[in-house]
Amino acid sequence: MTNLIEIIGWAAALLILASYLLVSTGRLSGTSAAFQWMNVIGAAGFIVNSGWHHALPSAVLNIAWMAIGLVALLRLRRTRLPA
């Protein structure tokens, strides 16, 4: 189980790092659904890893990070739906 948790944590780190790289190089927009999903999924992975290691500040930070991404995705969805 410990190895799985570590794999989840590293995958989360790579996903968030990739999202930042893609935005920084102009390949993704910070308001794109792809960017938001990469951050939401990455934050979820960090929550699992941080919780396992009892790193509560990191877990709380990533809960907030994930919530921000989910709110952004909801807003994107609302703007794309026809009125």
Image (tube, helix red, strand yellow):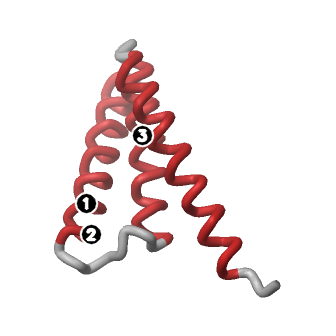
Is residue 50 placed above or below 18 in the rendered structure?
Answer: above
Query: Would you name the residue on which mark 3 appears?
Result: 45
Residue 74 in which image quadrant: bottom right
Query: Mark 1 or mark 3, which is nearer the start of the sequence?
Result: 1
Where's residue 18, x and y in %? 25, 61
- The mark found on residue 6 in the picture is none
Is residue 17 placed above or below 75 in the rendered structure?
Answer: above
Name the residue located 55 percent from the left edge and 44 percent from the top edge: 67
> What SS does tag 1 mark?
helix
Which residue is most to the right? 83
Local crowd size for mark 1, using a 10 Å CA cut-off: few (<14), some (14–19), many (≥20): some
| Mark 2 → mark 3, Cα distance in angstroms | 20 Å
**Quarter of the image where the C terminus is located:** bottom right
Please state which of residues 47 and 71 is positioned toward the viewer in this rendering: 71
Name the side, left or right, on which 4 lies relative to 21: right
At label 2, which amino acid type do we have? Val
At label 1, which amino acid type do we have? Tyr
Where's residue 30, x and y in %? 37, 68
**Quarter of the image where the N terminus is located:** top left
Asked whether the residues under the numbered discs 1 and 2 touch, taking CB atoms below 8 Å apart as contact, a structural biologist would say: yes
> What SS does tag 3 mark?
helix
Name the side, left or right, on which 52 lies relative to 83: left
| Mark 3 → mark 1, Cα distance in angstroms | 16 Å
Please state which of residues 27 and 83 is positioned toward the viewer in this rendering: 83
Name the residue located 41 percent from the left edge and 59 percent from the top edge: 38
Residue 2 in which image quadrant: top left
Please state which of residues 13 and 63 is positioned toward the viewer in this rendering: 63
Query: Would you name the residue on which mark 1 appears?
Result: 20
> What SS does tag 2 mark?
helix
Query: Would you name the residue on which mark 2 appears?
Result: 23
